[in-house]
């Protein structure tokens, strides 16, 4: 029974704490992006491509922890 | 009520478990024979082996991932091959415009990202980006479609149509990228230079760890995003699917429809973004490997 409870708690922690990292990372990323666009609006196109890539990179680890958490929870 | 809820809970984990199992064909120790894991299909009667998926050791293949990735590759690259062969000098057809637009987009990304001399990076970026996009688009198909056609088609009980939700496929792509990166860094820095750079650099094995982890992260990022996306589709299907089955509560599928539609729309961004990121990182890694620093 303990293993079952442990597995569920581990899954929940993995899913939850991963989102913490993603939230902080993407928050600061977009704030810097808006600042940069406010300072130089003509760079919007190029900067947006960079932000997309950086978004994907900051999402990498939280999403991996989410996937492992879901694996813990459901299989 | 509690018993009924408990009954539902058991069904949900079975439902999820059912949707997470690949169609595995492998070597079974017990009967020392090749075959599909038990009860996975009724089409090939003789090939049903007594082993469960977990009992099949190393030699077990996920046929649904292999089949789907080959099929999607054939469709996508067949389309581009057809458009290429029927290309005309004069007024380009709509298909040709679309193909040229896609090619232009990827070529600009490669030219801006890669400054080396190798001629393989362009086609590699083109192939990996489009192949992964076609893989990921499978996630937008309804959850029950695979098993519906499976039962209907001839008795495949377990069939995962999304190759990216099976870790083997993204890992295979990442391994190919790793081999290419190693080849090019050895070619530009020489075997000694490459090994020196990996181990002797002042921080010692740190460079080696970052070298391995960036390729593993490449595969796990793609796998994680799509597996989480697929899992959320399954969970939405569970939340509203089982109520819709009973005639007394048929209107329950409406919230399910809204939720599923909104997640699918958002998921289209994830599908395209992950393929784009995989391509951009492959280009960046190859560029890093082939410039002398």
Image (cartoon, grey):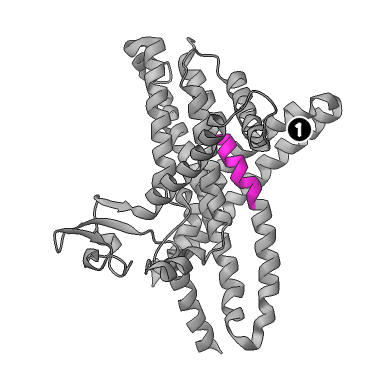
Q: Residue at x 25, y 68 (%)?
A: B45
Foreground: B106 or B232?
A: B106
Q: State the residue in front, B205 or B33.
A: B33
Locate the N terminus of chain B by quadrant: bottom right
Tell me the quarter of the picture where residue A53 sits: top right
Q: Is residue B159 above or below residue B205?
A: below
Residue B268 on the magenta segment: yes
Query: In the image, residue A71 lies at what x, y percent?
Result: 46, 58
Q: Which residue is mark 1?
A: A32
Residue under the point 69% across and 31% down? A49
User: In the image, is B272 to the left or to the right of B25?
Assistant: right
Q: Main secondary structure of the magenta part?
A: helix
Residue at the spot 46% in from the left edge and 18% down from the top edge = B289
| Magenta span of residues | B267-278
Q: Secondary structure at mark 1?
A: helix
The chain letter under disc 1 is A
Q: In the rendered view, does B215 fall on the left or right side of B2?
A: left
Residue B150 at least partly seen:
yes
Residue A66 seen in this snapshot: no
């Amino acid at each position: 029974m303990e293993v079952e409870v442990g597995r569920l708690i581990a899954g929940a922690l993995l899913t939850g704490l991963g989102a913490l990292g993603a939230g902080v990372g993407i928050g600061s990323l977009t704030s810097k992006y808006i600042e940069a666009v406010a300072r130089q609006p003509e760079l919007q196109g190029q900067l947006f491509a960079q932000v997309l890539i950086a978004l994907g990179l900051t999402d990498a680890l939280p999403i991996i922890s989410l996937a492992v958490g879901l694996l813990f929870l459901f299989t | 009520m509690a018993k009924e809820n408990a009954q539902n809970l058991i069904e949900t984990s079975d439902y999820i478990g059912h949707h997470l199992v690949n169609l595995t064909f492998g070597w079974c120790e017990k009967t020392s024979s090749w075959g599909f894991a038990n009860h996975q299909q009724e089409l090939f009667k003789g090939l049903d082996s007594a082993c469960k998926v977990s009992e099949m050791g190393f030699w077990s293949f996920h046929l649904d991932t292999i089949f789907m990735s080959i099929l999607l590759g054939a469709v996508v690259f067949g389309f581009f091959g057809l458009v290429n062969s029927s290309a005309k000098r004069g007024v380009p057809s709509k298909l040709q415009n679309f193909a040229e637009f896609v090619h232009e987009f990827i070529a600009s990304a490669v030219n801006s990202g890669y400054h080396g001399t190798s001629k393989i990076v362009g086609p590699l970026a083109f192939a990996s980006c489009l192949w992964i996009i076609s893989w990921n688009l499978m996630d937008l198909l309804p959850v029950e479609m695979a098993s519906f056609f499976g039962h209907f088609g001839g008795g495949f009980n377990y069939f995962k149509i999304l190759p990216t939700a099976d870790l083997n496929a993204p890992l295979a792509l990442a391994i190919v990228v790793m081999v290419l990166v190693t080849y090019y860094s050895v070619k530009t820095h020489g075997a000694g230079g490459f090994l020196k750079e990996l181990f002797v650099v002042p921080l010692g094995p740190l460079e080696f760890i970052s070298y391995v982890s960036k390729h593993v992260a490449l595969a796990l990022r793609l796998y994680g995003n799509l597996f989480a996306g697929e899992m959320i589709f399954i969970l939405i299907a569970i939340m509203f699917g089982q109520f819709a089955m009973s005639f007394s509560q048929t209107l329950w599928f409406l919230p399910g429809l809204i939720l599923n539609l909104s997640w699918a729309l958002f998921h289209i961004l994830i599908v395209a973004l992950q393929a784009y990121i995989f391509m951009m990182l492959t280009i960046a890694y190859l560029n890093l490997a082939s410039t002398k620093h």
